[in-house]
């Protein structure tokens, strides 16, 4: 650039307006040296778009992943709640069914019903003179002593009475 010409100042850069004047001062400032200054005005970089774009992309991806995670978690919790409700209903049904079956077993195993069924089928207690007892050699499996009057056959005999 020639010394007589000056550049127009750049927009938005106040330091550029006095550039020509500083150049002249630098050349004439000391002992007549013609040394040039290495400093120069640089136009500012357009900020924002280049730096903002990766931040926005990462932010949207992160927020999207978090929203997807929360929605998925809510769906899993809802499914678990529905499954838990079905299991509780099934448990209540099974408890009711178990109670009914337990009552049915108690009714069917009652001594009165067994006596009634035995009489209906024509069964009767044997004559004591025809009853035979067998002695079995060996070690008995059950070593507990029980009274004969506590055995089930005597409970049945009490229900039937003494009649043959």
Image (cartoon, rainbow, N blue to C red):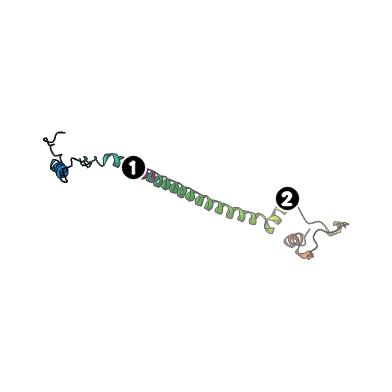
List the residue tagged with mark 1: 60
At x 17% / y 44%, what residue is drawn?
26
- Circle 2/circle 1 CB separation < 8 Å: no
What separation in Å lies between label 2 and label 1 (alpha carbons)? Answer: 85 Å
Under tag 1, what secondary structure? helix
Position of residue 131 in the picture relative to residue 18 (left or right): right
Q: Measured from the top left, where is residue 130 in percent x and y?
A: 86, 56
Viewer-closest of 156 and 12? 12
Give the main secondary structure of the magenta stretch.
Answer: helix
Q: Measured from the top left, where is residue 42 in percent x and y?
A: 22, 40
What is the quadrant of the C terminus in the image?
Answer: bottom right
Position of residue 110 in the picture relative to residue 19 (left or right): right
Residue segment shown in magenta: 59-65
Q: How many marks?
A: 2
Q: Measured from the top left, where is residue 25 in percent x and y?
A: 14, 44
Position of residue 104 in the picture relative to residue 84 (left or right): right
List the residue tagged with mark 2: 121
């Amino acid at each position: 650039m020639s010394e007589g010409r000056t550049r127009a100042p750049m927009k938005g850069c106040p330091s550029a307006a006095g550039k020509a004047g500083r150049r002249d001062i630098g050349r004439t400032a000391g002992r007549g040296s013609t040394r040039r200054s290495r400093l120069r005005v640089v136009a500012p970089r357009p900020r924002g778009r280049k730096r903002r774009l990766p931040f926005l992309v990462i932010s949207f991806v992160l927020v999207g992943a978090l929203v997807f995670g929360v929605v998925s978690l809510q769906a899993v919790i809802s499914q678990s709640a529905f499954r838990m409700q079905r299991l509780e209903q099934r448990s209540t049904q099974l408890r009711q069914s178990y109670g009914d079956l337990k009552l049915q077993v108690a009714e069917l195993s009652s001594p009165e019903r067994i006596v009634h069924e035995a009489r209906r089928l024509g069964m009767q207690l044997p004559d004591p003179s025809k009853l035979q007892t067998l002695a079995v050699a060996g070690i008995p499996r059950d070593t507990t002593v029980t009274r004969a009057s506590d055995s089930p056959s005597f409970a049945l005999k009490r229900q039937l009475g003494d009649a043959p």
